[in-house]
Amino acid sequence: MATYVLIHGAGDSAFYWHLLEPELRARGHEAVSMDLPCEDDSAGLAEYADAVIRAIGERRGLILELDLP
């Protein structure tokens, strides 16, 4: 099955996906979510990307789901 990488919007947390993650897993998929450094005003794109890359690890063949305003 597929691996979904769930990326929350600004000012939110990985908890945003708490209803979707179990549904994906129940259908045989893997779900990966992470907390982005939203509380750190000095964090830029590199720090956000690092958080996503750490969460993904060695997984490949991913589907990204973004919460964009």
Image (cartoon, rainbow, N blue to C red):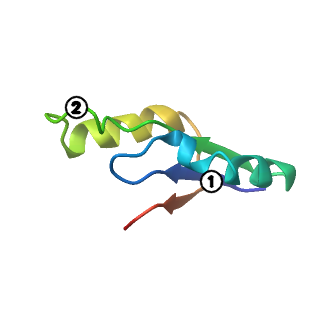
Quadrant location, the C terminus: bottom left
Amino acid at the residue labelled 1: Tyr
Quadrant location, the N terminus: bottom right
Element on which disc 1 rests: strand
The residue labelled by disc 1 is: 4
Pick the front one: 63 or 40: 40
Query: Percent position (x, y) of residue 57?
Result: 52, 33
Q: Which of marks 2 and 1 is nearer the N terminus?
A: 1
Residue positioned 16% across, 36% down in the render: 41
Pick the front one: 45 or 18: 18
Asked if residue 65 lies left or right of residue 40, the reply is right
Residue positioned 52% across, 59% down in the render: 64
Mark 1, residues whose alpha carbon is within 10 Å: few (<14), some, or many (≥20)? Answer: many
Asked if residue 56 lies left or right of residue 39, the reply is right
Residue positioned 31% across, 34% down in the render: 37
Pick the front one: 54 or 12: 12
The residue labelled by disc 2 is: 40
Mark 2, residues whose alpha carbon is within 10 Å: few (<14), some, or many (≥20)? Answer: few
Relative to 58, say whether 24 is above or below.
below
Relative to 42, say whether 66 is above or below.
below
Q: Residue 21 carries which label?
A: none
Relative to 18, say whether 55 is above or below.
above
Q: Quadrant of residue 61?
A: bottom right
Relative to 38, say whether 21 is above or below.
below
Query: Percent position (x, y) of residue 7?
Result: 47, 51
Query: Percent position (x, y) of residue 12?
Result: 41, 46
